[in-house]
Image: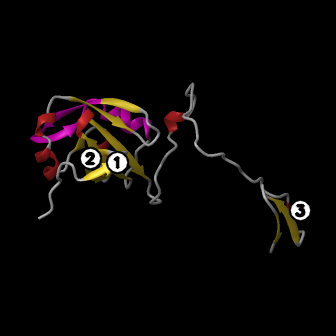
């Protein structure tokens, strides 16, 4: 039988206990129930404040409680779920960091890819700095697309690309 065990995985040099949840019912917007095996490993969190940290390093305060006989996050969860625009079918991976009582939360969309941009990012005063340079290539005008070859320039070399239309 599998158990959620303490000190099982290291993330950024910290020991964590992990579990996942699939958002399958509309109630997930209001309350997040811990899996029973995970809940048995953290009963000391009942009525304690914890932080939920997203993939951008932003934190939300939440409170763990006993809700309808199960350990859950209710207070603060509604704000976290709304600001991350959680939807049915999304997959959340929680890493509990016991040393400082917080959860690192990774959110995977229905595409299977991790979500890193959230609706709550719009209008924020300061975005997190990127560690890489973001570049985009504009779409070609239809007249330019009909040409059989286009010369693309990269930082170190020129590459000829044949367009098939």
Seen at 66% across and 45% down, the residue is 133
The stretch in magenta equals 62-84
Of the image marks 3 and 1, the number of the one nearer the N terminus: 1
Eye-nearest disc, 3 or 1: 1
Q: Answer with the quarter of the image where residue 69 lies.
A: top left
Q: Which secondary structure, mark 3?
A: helix
Of the image marks 1 and 2, the number of the one nearer the N terminus: 1
Mark 1 vs 2: CB contact within 8 A:
yes
Q: Position of residue 131 (x, y in %)?
A: 58, 43
The numbered disc on residue 144 is 3
Seen at 43% across and 40% down, the residue is 84
Mark 2 vs 3: CB contact within 8 A:
no
Q: Quadrant of the C terminus?
A: bottom right
Q: Is residue 77 magenta?
A: yes
How far apart, in angstroms, are the residues tagged by discs 1 and 2? 7 Å
Within 10 Å of disc 1 (Cα), the crowding (few <14, some 14-19, many 20+) is few
Within 10 Å of disc 3 (Cα), the crowding (few <14, some 14-19, many 20+) is few
Q: Position of residue 13 (x, y in %)?
A: 34, 45
The numbered disc on residue 11 is 1
The numbered disc on residue 16 is 2
Of the image marks 2 and 3, the number of the one nearer the N terminus: 2
Eye-nearest disc, 2 or 3: 2
Above or below, comparing residue 11 to residue 158 in the picture: above
Circle count: 3
Of 53 and 77, which appears nearest the observer?
A: 53
């Amino acid at each position: 039988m599998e158990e959620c065990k303490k000190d099982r995985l290291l993330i950024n040099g910290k020991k964590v206990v992990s579990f996942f949840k699939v958002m399958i019912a509309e109630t997930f917007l209001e309350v997040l129930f811990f899996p029973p095996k995970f809940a048995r490993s953290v009963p000391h969190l009942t009525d304690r404040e914890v932080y939920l940290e997203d993939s951008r390093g932003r934190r939300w305060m939440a409170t763990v409680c006993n809700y309808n006989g199960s350990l859950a996050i209710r207070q603060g969860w509604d704000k976290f779920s709304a600001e991350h625009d959680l939807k049915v079918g999304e997959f959340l991976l929680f890493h509990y960091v016991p040393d400082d009582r917080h959860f690192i939360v990774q959110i995977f969309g229905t595409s299977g890819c991790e979500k890193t941009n959230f609706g709550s990012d719009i209008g924020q005063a300061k975005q997190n700095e990127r560690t890489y340079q973001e570049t985009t290539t504009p779409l070609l005008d239809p007249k330019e697309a009909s040409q059989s070859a286009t010369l693309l320039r990269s930082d170190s070399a020129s590459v000829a690309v044949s367009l098939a239309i």
